[in-house]
Image (cartoon, coloured by chain):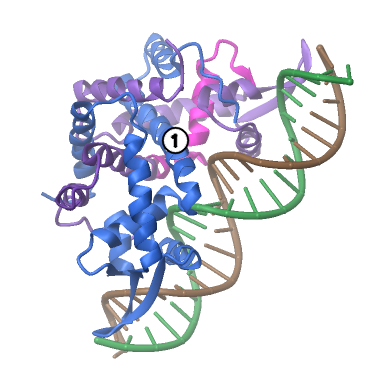
Chain colours: A blue, B purple, C green, D brown
DNA sequence: CATATCTCAGATATACTGATATTT
DNA sequence: CAAATATCAGTATATCTGAGATAT
């Protein structure tokens, strides 16, 4: 892409024009546009850092979820619930991780409908190394300290709660 | 998708496990995960609201940009700069908007290399109506007041600035 | 000729729908 | 038989690369 930074903040400028025309909810508009834009910038950075492991952030999240789970394995459906990913997308992502040698699938002995995804030792190693690389880059949040990071998490938790991501 | 909310906050739980293992930068990890998740939830809502206009949020942003621009038209390349969209993606999105009857393309009289994208009257009408619909839904930020919305914009501006989205 | 603008073809990623097989 | 789980085929969107056409 053409990565020349703009000489002004495009979101601030849009908000000015927005207000000048008397359009509604300029604060919400700016916040949502900021979220979309930041997500785009962060994912580009993180995916670049993860490319050396043949990972994307979406697939990294799956590896981390499996590593954090007690037994290093989890039913396909549960992965989708936790990460809000469509069942068909879970199948596709796990197949991709299988091709990289990071995950294996096996039937659940207690319920033959269920398939368990499990980390391989290569998958566990990739997850550890990738977590180090991402941590060194503070997950792309260069200009932000921990106080600001916690503020983001806290405010966005309200949105997730109101949007039905979780209850309580 | 299976839209049953989880009975707990999956990001808070991941952060607990993260800390328990002594992994690095749990605050940054939670913030980034929250941003990715919220963007996913918001876009799903907004795209559902925009489907009646044959729009996605990405294409709505282009219509709004054209409506806010002085003459209702803009070079393809400039659209890409403003919205951080790849030139090939601009071509594709504008073609899609053209198919919906919302935009026309014409050569720039002062530089024949440039193509100007301009709103049709149907495109202007769709933008106005879509802006009303999105505004009524506060752009998906139901549980958030304007103070919190401005906080989000302000904190995320630091990230965008540090990531080279703009200077100054 | 070198650069700028745009378009296109092809590859990859992700999301969702609807259908299907299998098991509970 | 009804519900749950996972997969697959097909469609849509978005991103990027590399090539090329046209104009400055």
A51 sits to left or right of B151: right
Residue identifier under label 1: A40
Decide which of B123, B70 is in the foreground and name it.
Answer: B70
Task: Name the spot of residue A23 as percent of width and height, x first.
Answer: 37, 18
Residue positioned 43% across, 16% down in the render? A14
Residue A18's quadrant in the figure?
top left
Magenta region includes residue B74 = yes
- Compared with B150, A92 (above or below) is below
B154 sits to left or right of B102: left
Residue D19's quadrant in the figure?
top right
Asked if one can make out residue A30 in the rendered structure from this viewpoint, the answer is yes
Decide which of A116, C22 is in the foreground and name it.
Answer: A116
Residue positioned 44% across, 32% down in the render? A41
| Total tally of numbered discs in the picture | 1
Magenta region includes residue A168 = no
Quadrant occupied by the N terminus of chain B: bottom left
Q: Residues within 10 Å of mark 1 (few under 14, many from 20)?
A: some
């Amino acid at each position: 892409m053409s990565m020349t930074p703009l000489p002004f903040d495009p979101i601030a400028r849009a908000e000015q024009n927005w207000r000048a025309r008397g359009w509604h909810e300029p604060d919400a508009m700016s916040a949502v546009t900021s979220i979309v834009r930041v997500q785009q910038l962060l994912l580009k950075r993180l995916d670049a850092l993860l490319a050396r492991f043949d990972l994307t952030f979406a697939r990294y999240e799956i590896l981390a979820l499996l590593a954090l789970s007690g037994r290093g394995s989890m039913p396909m459906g549960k992965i989708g619930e936790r990460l809000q990913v469509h069942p068909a997308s879970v199948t596709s992502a796990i197949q991709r991780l299988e091709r990289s040698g990071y995950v294996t699938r096996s039937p659940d002995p207690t319920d033959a409908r269920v398939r368990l995804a499990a980390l391989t030792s290569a998958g566990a190693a990739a997850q550890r190394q990738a977590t180090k690389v991402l941590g060194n880059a503070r997950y792309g949040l260069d200009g932000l300290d921990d106080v600001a990071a916690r503020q983001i998490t806290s405010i966005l938790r309200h949105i997730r709660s109101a949007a039905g991501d979780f209850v309580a």
